[in-house]
Image (tube, rainbow, N blue to C red):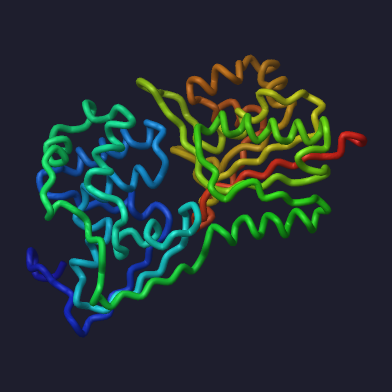
Amino acid sequence: MPGGNTLFRAGMNDLVFCLMSGGVSSLCIHPIAGISIADKIEMNRLLVHCGADVTEIMTVRRHLSRIKGGRLAERLHPATIVALTVSDAIGDPMEWNTDWTSPDSSTFHDAVRILKKYDLWASCPKSVTAYLSEFKPHKETPKSFAGYNITTQMTVRTQDLWEAAIERSRAMHLRPYLLTTTLNGESREVGRTIASLARETIASGNPFTPPCALIAAGETAVRIVGENTGLGGANQELAAGACLDLKENDPIVVCALDTDGTDGPTSLAGGLTDGSTIVRAAENGYDLYNELLKHNITPLLLDLGDAIDTGSTGTNVNDLVIVVVGSPSTGA
């Protein structure tokens, strides 16, 4: 900032635009006093590996921050705030997409509960457990912005994602079925569940009529226990898990991808698998299930040509899963 350590504050006559998109809450941090950036980074590592969903992760992060959970709006008041966001949260809730300028519905005690729920309390940096061990009113995030001048606008919604998938399916003469817009759970097991619906559709024509496209949007998670040296991501594991129970000639193809083009800590967007994936994996010396257990599915998908590589898309509107189920009579 100009002027060295001089603190500039927004005033009554200032207009502040806050542009927020998926990932901003993890890429920009300002920990509370007493918690170092290194400790905050360690907290994020623990949370993304424990299997917690994104709202649980954000609940903890915002209670360790000076700017999240609406605290940036407190710092900018009494300026006029215009918050523009791209949704990457299930259901397109404004709060979880404009995290820094919306009142927080979660609580200090929620953050503590989540850490204990996933057995993280003993692993947290001491500065974090020390802070969270004693509640004081000033530690709570703001619950109301009555009297604040804040305008929020969602420019892109997750709904736009699955609506486009439905439209494209119809154009390809596939009956679209929206399974859920709140997809969550352990990635590989979610994949197996969705694949079981596709298999039943082939076997009995229920609960869907083929040829069709089963569409789901949301965000699954990968729980990592112990040290992990593998390379993969939630969507890649979902796609690989889905093909575990498919036969080689099943007319079923599974696509799972992260819409920002980066699934987990990889440059891949996701995976495109079918019943031949597990067969070709074995032919190439891979045990697909074992690779899933090691969370090392990226090399396998790359070697088989079943990886989806879109490059950076420049946006993030949640994850998308599409399962195309062909006609059992033609095998198409």
Residue at image point 78% right, 36% down: 201
Q: Residue 258 at x, y = what percent?
A: 54, 46
The spot of residue 174 in percent (x, y) is: 80, 50
**Image-quadrant location for residue 3:** bottom left
Image position of 178 with respect to 198: above or below: below
Q: Residue at x 55, y 17 (%)?
A: 290
Q: Is residue 98 above or below residue 210?
A: below
Q: Residue at x 49, y 52 (%)?
A: 90
Left or right placement of residue 117 versus residue 94 in this view: left
Residue lying furthest right in this view?
329
Q: Nearer the viewer, residue 143 or 123?
A: 143
* Viewer-nearest residue: 86 or 272: 86
Q: Quadrant of the C terminus?
A: top right
Residue 141 % position (x, y): 22, 56
Residue nearest the viewer, comparing 215 with 43: 215
Direction from residue 275 to residue 228 in the image, left or right: left
Q: Quadrant of the N terminus?
A: bottom left
Left or right position of 254 against 54: right
